[in-house]
Amino acid sequence: MMTQFGITAYGTYLPAHRISLAEIGSTLNINAGRGVRVAASFDEDSTTMGVAAAVAALGPGVAPNGLYFATTTPAYADKANATAVHAALGLRPDMLAVDLAGSARSGIAALLAAANAGGLAVLADMRVGRPGSSDERNGGDGAAAFVFGGDPIAEIIARSSLTAEFLDRWRDPRSATGEQWEERFGIEQYQPLVRKAAAKALASAELTEADHVVLVSPNVTLAKRVSKAVAGKLTTRNSPIGHAGTSDVGLALAAVLDEAEPDETILVISAADGCDALVLRATERISHARQPISVAAQLEHGSSVPYPTYLTWRGLLDREPPRRPEPDRVAGPPSARTTGWKFALTGSVCGSCEMVHLPPARVCKRCSAIDAMSEVSLARSEGVVTTFTVDRLAYSPAPPVVDAVVDFDAGGRYAFEVADGGSDRLAVGSRVRMTFRRLHSAAGVHNYFWKAQLL
């Protein structure tokens, strides 16, 4: 039976940092190829990137029927990561929010679950490879989110799945980096699965070929070998940033949705622990409901980061830590008491004089009204920098630490750390938006909050 709901909106997020493959090659004395690798910052993880993609996908007031978060690099084990995404988005409490983790195939699982429920699928991953490895050179960090519901921009008209057990890629749960068998073995296993799944899905959709084909796999060489056999009439795409784990299929699909025209068909093939094939057809709405910033545009923009800095961020280069006290672990009870403020940046607005308070307060600072407040979230709001400071003494994996006082367009003022550097571009009057990040981690606990990001 076909899924009930189609894609009504989507959003993607690519981190701002880029690692030069040429620098990797010169540092390690290897041929690392050309181009750049998309890399998450030291204060980003799969949860924060998932929030960024979901914010881009969800319109104001949209209430999906469930949140399905897929990643192979969860920030927590034995604790749901989807709940932090749910809290940061300010979604209603009577909603299912669950993780689908463990393999790249979890991305397809999240899409199908959200399609069946009319929910939100969030696919996010950080690919960590040992220095000089294929995962390091051919991988990338990123996230994609898809909202499913009625009146879609693209509807699923057919699908097929095949499952097979063979050892192609794996990772010890205690290790940050993965392993892969010799690529030719994986290609031999995947090729017949890809052809069979694609043929079955196309036949079910009563098509001989699709206008666009998306082909992704943890086996990055596979796409080059079989692309001719399943090529689209107009385009054939792989993941735009290399292997991106669960977000692989989401980023590649989003790149096609950025350009697809009404009534064009898209064959999505994901070869991971078997093969899944989806056939989608774009509707008339797609021309007017694309994501604000395309995948291609996000890929073009980015700032260079030195390779040793990137290795330090990933814990692969053990450098001398600062001689300063370690940060304290975030405690559960106070965090629970301030969930709305900490995760959704929810302040309060006075019903008498309309002054916005950050953090929320019971007593108005302007008119002294008591308990006359209502909640207001500023997570999606933009603002203006009124003053800032550049601290070159405070420790940061990406010094200096920049703090800015932000006046929000919707009212309210608060001091935030500035994400992704920008000390050379920041000025009084600079426009910023909010981005969900990690302030620090201690004893295995992550302290999530919002930072300001230059527009």
Image (cartoon, rainbow, N blue to C red):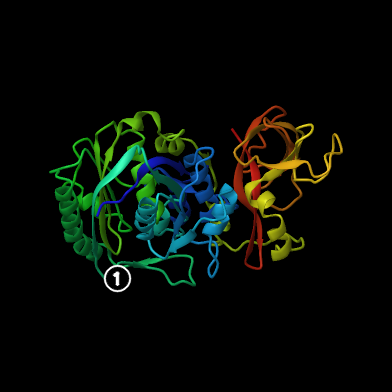
**Residue at 47% over, 48% down:** 64
Q: Is residue 289 left or right of residue 418?
A: left
Q: How many marks?
A: 1
**Residue 144 vertical placement versus 285 (above, below):** below
**Residue at 71% over, 42% down:** 374
**Residue 447 vertical placement versus 349 (above, below):** below
Q: Is residue 185 left or right of residue 436?
A: left
Q: Is residue 271 left or right of residue 113?
A: left
- Looking at this view, is 432 or 60 the one in front? 60
Image position, residue 348 (x, y; %):
73, 42
Determine if residue 137 is in view. Answer: yes
Quadrant placement of the C terminus: top right
Q: Which residue is mark 1?
A: 167
**Residue 194 vertical placement versus 355 (above, below):** below
- The quarter of the displayed image where residue 7 is located: top left
Quadrant placement of the N terminus: bottom left
Q: Residues within 10 Å of mark 1 (few under 14, many from 20)?
A: few
- Looking at this view, is 73 or 333 the one in front? 333
Q: Is residue 254 left or right of residue 423?
A: left
Image position, residue 223 (x, y; %):
25, 51
- Give the secondary structure at mark 1: loop
Which amino acid type corresponds to the residue marked 1 in the rendered image?
Answer: Leu
